[in-house]
Amino acid sequence: MLTKEQNDLLTQTGPGTPGGKLFRQYWLPVALVEQVPQGGAPVPLRILGEDLVLFRGEDGQLGLMGRLCPHRCTDLSYGRIEDGGLRCLYHGWLFDRTGKCIEQPAEPANSTYKDEVKHPAYPVVEKAGVVFSYMGEGAPPDFPEYEFLEIDASHRSIYKIHLECNYLQACEGDFDPSHVSYLHRRMTDAPTANAVPGGEAGRDSGSYFKANIRPKLSFEKTDYGVRIFSEREMDGGKKYLRVTNFLLPSLACIAGRQAGDGYSAVWRIPIDDTHHWRFGFQFQRSAPVDRKYYDEQNKTEIGPGYMPIRTQANRYLQDRESMKTSTFTGMGTLFMVHDAFAAETQGPIQDRSRENLGAGDVIIAGVRRLLRQAIDDVAHGKLPPNVTRGAADKTYPNLIIVNAVVDASVENADYVRGLVGKDRFNAQSAAE
Ligand code: FES
Ligand SMILES: [Fe+2]
């Protein structure tokens, strides 16, 4: 449970707020590259409560700047891309991609007024099909070289989807190991091809989640956030071990259907305090991803404008008949939908003064403490976790994701340390 003040601190990310200052320490995904093709229209964006326009100039370079023209505030996202920048439709002021005003047609020819006009603009980087921006002050930090961003495009699937709630309550679902035994449960025990490394043939993670609904939970701090252990005791002296990671400010790396050969990354970016984007990355190392599978999945659940097909307004198209034989929720098989239902129905901003946390929420409470500490760090001029400038290595050799059945006697932290710097994501190779 949190007080209203504590809840505000963690959920507000607008300009000037302590939480907003934390988010503005990081490179953040703000759009997909496919939204800004050469010759395409400028894209209106809202990120961290700021109205912005993203555009690709005639030179192919991207610019991200304040959406309202600093002259008399007309929307620049309707503007013309010409003459080396973005031109406002109202009186023709022209801005380059750094936000510098380079023409003011109605001013005297020798006027220097344009040099005095300040317009906010932020640096952008295109990586892995995603546009990232640093919306903070001063020089940007090191760009994070996560493996899911660095790997060849054929080994990766990306998506983006809108959620109608505060980012934090959805993040809390991403690193909540106990909900998976229920929310994502399948109502059939049919054998599956998505085997768990070290596990029995025909059993996938869902089968292990169902077999033990009371995971033992623990976590340890890392330089980027927290490493979360959930272990489920199994018969025959075994346990099902999962290691999930939360990275500041709002990224979760979770074992997905890749079963030890890659993982799923879910990055939640506040639009404002009551809406956010979910950016998703799924990759596997050993072979290109099954593109058809991911395309189909995304087409089924993501509509035009990256809006979800299933929403509160249509009650997530819940099919109660299918709850008997198909899924626990009756909302289809995609975890992303179940997670959206769980988070959005908590309200635009979950009122954490009304909740009742239990032993199964120990991770939730731990991450909230971490976020509060990070906000405090920034307020005191310190670098929060996962921000570096001039680091020699930004490749995260200690970011270990595990999904494996191992001997019950295995010590979790040792197991993870055995994987550091080796085959980081393939738990099976460590088990051998
Ligand atoms: S409002 Fe943009 S040029 Fe006047
Ligand atoms: Fe979930």
Image: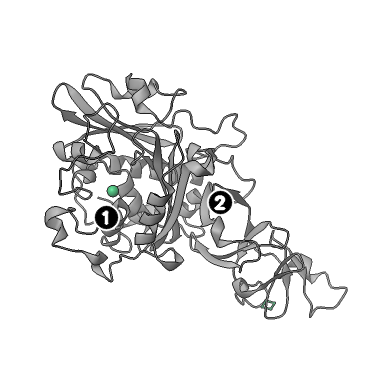
Residue placed under numbered mark 1 in the picture: 338
Toward which corner of the image does residue 426 lie, by quadrant?
top left
Which image quarter is the C terminus in? top left
In the displayed image of the protein, which residue is found farthest to the left? 324
Q: Relative to residue 25, is residue 248 drawn left or right? A: left
Q: Residue at x 36, y 55 (%)?
A: 297
Between 370 and 126, the one lying in front of the other is: 126
Q: Amino acid at mark 2?
A: Phe
Please, is residue 77 above or below residue 381 in the view? Answer: below
Toward which corner of the image does residue 107 lie, by quadrant?
bottom right
Q: Residue at x 48, y 59 (%)?
A: 48
Q: Is mark 1 within 8 Å of ligand 2?
A: yes
Please, is residue 405 above or below residue 42 in the view? Answer: above
Between 286 and 274, the one lying in front of the other is: 286
Q: Which one is closest to the eye, mark 1 or mark 2?
A: 1
Residue placed under numbered mark 2 in the picture: 132
Please, is residue 321 above or below residue 420 in the view? Answer: below
Q: Badge 2: how crowded within 10 Å, few (<14), some, or many (20+)?
A: many
